[in-house]
Image: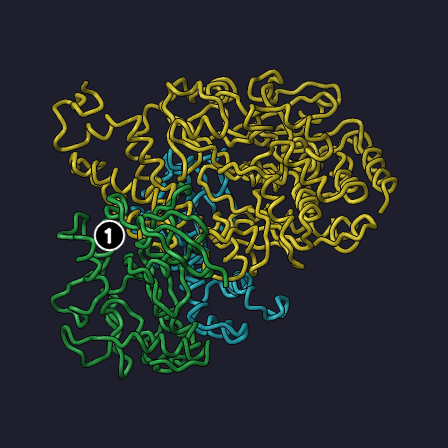
Chain colours: A cyan, B yellow, C green
Amino acid sequence: MKRHQYQADSLIEVLHSAQQLFGYLEDGLLLYIAHSLHVPPSRVYGVATFYHFFSLKPQGKHSCVICLGTACYVKGATQLVDAISQTYGIKAGQTSEDGQVSLLTARCVGACGIAPAVVYDGTVSGHGTSENVIEKLKGWREDGAA
Amino acid sequence: MELPELHQIAEKERASQKPIRLRICVAAGCQSSGSLAVKKKLEDTVKEAGLSDKVQVVGVGCLKMCSQGPLVQADPTQTLYAKVDETQAAGLVGAVNGGHCHCATVDPNDPFLAHQFSIVLENSGLIDPERIESYIAAEGYEGLYHVLREKTPTEIVETVIKSGLRGRGGAGYPTGLKWALVAKMQSPRKFVVCNADEGDPGAFMDRSVLESDPHRILEGMAIAGYAIGATQGYIYVRGEYPLAIKRLQGAIRQAKRLGMLGGHIFESPFDFNIDLRIGAGAFVCGEETALMASIEGRRGQPRPRPPFPAESGLWGQPTLINNVETFANIPTLIRKGADWFSAIGTEKSKGTKVFALAGKITNTGLIEVPMGTTLRRIVEEMGGGVENGGTVKAVQTGGPSGGCIPADKLDTPVDYESLAAIGSIMGSGGMIVMDQSTNMVDVARFFMEFCMDESCGKCAPCRAGTVQMYRLLSKIREGRGTQQDIDMLNGLCDLLRNTSLCGLGQTAPNPTLSTLRYFRHEYEQLLTDSTVNGQLPKHPANTT
Amino acid sequence: MAVKTLTIDDQLISAREEQTVLEAAREAGISIPTLCELHGLGDIGACRLCLVEVTGIAKLQPACTTRVAEGMVVVTNSQRLQNYRRMIVELLFAERNHICAVCVANGHCELQDLGLAVGMDHVRYEYLSPQCQVDLSHERFGVDHNRCVLCMRCVRACDEIEGAHTWDVMGRGTASRVITDLKQPWGESQSCTSCGKCVLACPTGAIFRRGSTVSEMERDRWQLDFIVTAREKKQWII
């Protein structure tokens, strides 16, 4: 926050940094940000819930983001989501019970050339299929259990 | 810095290049196909073979044929190797050194490459996006030098007006007129904003430009700043593009170090700084008033215009907002002149347009073509038609704000007016090809779901209307709809188009309207009260 | 003070140049339906009910944010506008759970009045019937999200007039909700001064005085106007 000179208009940058540091934005943190930037708490909350990037709940250890942009959609990305949902019983936006995997969807990650695209822990991977997605998640869960 | 110094940097850069260069794409597309590992392997191989003073491996921006990645192009032969993996590294290094390898190559006469005309992408795949020297060696920042030292702001605005360049964000407002509007405002503080919130699903042109040639945007913005009298610029870039953000941050740092940004640029009285603002996942922020709200740290909700940003934009000051591709045209346009630029394209749409080809098409990737090129040439010749020998059913342009163009309209030339006339829009440049297996009601529902999720919630028609339209489309898709539902859907399309506060709501009906217009039978086949066996029911348009 | 002459619904009207079309029309006795607009609050042009046709401009313009101009020709009540207004009101009714018969604001509700004004006899759209909460944690006031139309009057009244900015909006699209502080129960809000300006501003029964029963909730909206004029012009007009 110091870097942003406690400017009220840096609220979104500050929320980005806070989420990077803490993984998610809990109420205490939001209140602290509001006080430090001298903006109303309700505005901080309003901004944090307006943008998809910000999460108010803790995320799983790993994240699997399925791109649902047009190109990926046309190439069957929804089947990937269904496959994961069925295998692990989690819907998009949820985290598996063991806290290992969060399943998320995105509105186009801009990797349409290699659709359907899947982002594993921030690394984009192309040509996703139900099989290779499940395989990858299985690996994560085994690592977590070990 | 004086011109000779700039030339010195360029000379030194060129002199440092080895006779044989392997340019490997390290933009996001190829990176996700593993190009970084291939690059490492190539570098190791060159070192081990003792060829370091002869062969050089360079990371470059997008080589365009994304579906064939990782791509490597060799100089001076220009051979383009496709789908290179680590095991082929040794063979490839041998091949450029006089040997042979079994790597797949792309025919340089392939229509995908042969029909391209590069302005925006002229450096893409040629220069190292992480080194400013590489951009300077490609005549980068020379335009800015001449502008600051030899031209008046008015001359620059006139050049841009004369060139006929129109906004590449989709709507096609003449760029020069926009600049002139902001230039004539009397205000001590003005801003230049680059809209890099490329939110259309299926579009990755801007991302590629930012990742492949970031300095081009900085130079374009600095020229704009000088022309309109602004000293501060912002680039609002999507949070989904970490690599583009990293390269922009690096580029800004380097430009400041060499004095292309900051105070007294090129020893002129002109000061200009650029800061990045990172989006946080909201499509509506592509709308200019919402984007400004977001830069100011607020919820990205649009407000009524007027006042336009040119009069009252960021923090109430006159603000120029252009899209990435618009700014990317500027350095070349200034260097080569308005007459050169306006000779390209059609009467009303000048220059080129970059498209991101994707979907059920053989060659996915980036293309840049002169305005007026037909969709057929783009899809069938350059794109190689539908993958696995299928046939085209429709081409979607303009994302959630655009329309689906049926196969029998493929001879339409790509320009702002022609695309609008057939119910789509130029949009920012996403082009998704759909084959016969695609259900068009599904497509309409997909985009409506997108608009419903992305509606900011401020104005009533868009907030409450998109959700109703989504429900109606779902009902029809699931075979529970009636003719009355289609009428209601049409009514809502009309309402949103005419009463919504911003572009998102006003254009949200486009995919539905265009599919209703060209693929109405697909809707009617799904109705409970449709006539039997998928026969076309009679409706007013079919009877005389 | 410059004066502009314009035509609204075939009526020749003189207006001060800083006036909006809505203000000019009202002074001339022409009524245009509104919802998010409230005198004394900043205009946001969000409900789209006051859209009018202006000759020479292809797009419909919100009367609340459009300034008058010399020679302007405005139509406020064409068949097309009437259709749109009715659809928007229907969409609002379908969006939450508006049950007039059990509402504290029954008979004194702007949404209800709008329904009558636009001739809405039934709602053609599917009721979304969302799950909405009722917050009765504040000792004097309550908020029932079933009745909220997201006009943001409470947000603006609290921010612009009271200055506390207790209210804001969270989420987006149809999932948006008005919130107090960090979406806490209203009664636990530290910034709320319990001034009741949001209660005065709310057009429906969403924000109400506790203890009111069906149809009891009348609001003294003139009080907002009174405060704004007093603050800005140092004139205390009742």
Query: Is residue C70 shown above or below C135?
Result: above
Quarter of the picture containing the C terminus of chain B is top left
What is the quadrant of residue C143 in the picture?
Answer: bottom left
Q: Is residue C131 left or right of residue B177?
A: left
Q: Is residue C106 left or right of residue B179?
A: left
Q: Is residue B132 left or right of residue C203?
A: right
- In the image, B245 versus C108, the foreground residue is C108
Residue A137 visible in the picture = no
Residue B114 visible in the picture = yes
Residue at x-position 59% and y-position 71%: A6
Query: Is residue C64 shown above or below C181?
Result: above
Kindly identify which residue carries mark 1: C91
Q: Residues within 10 Å of mark 1 (few under 14, many from 20)?
A: many
Residue at x-position 40% and y-position 39%: B401
Element at badge 1? helix
**Residue A50: image x %, image y %?**
42, 59
Task: Report the number of discs.
Answer: 1
Q: Chain of mark 1?
A: C
Residue at x-position 27% and y-position 45%: C78
Query: Is residue A35 shown above or below B272?
Result: below
- In the image, B536 versus B129, the foreground residue is B536
**Residue B175: image x %, image y %?**
59, 39
**Residue C88: image x %, image y %?**
26, 51
Identify the amino acid type marked 1. Answer: Leu
**Residue C155: image x %, image y %?**
38, 69
Q: Residue furthest top?
A: B109
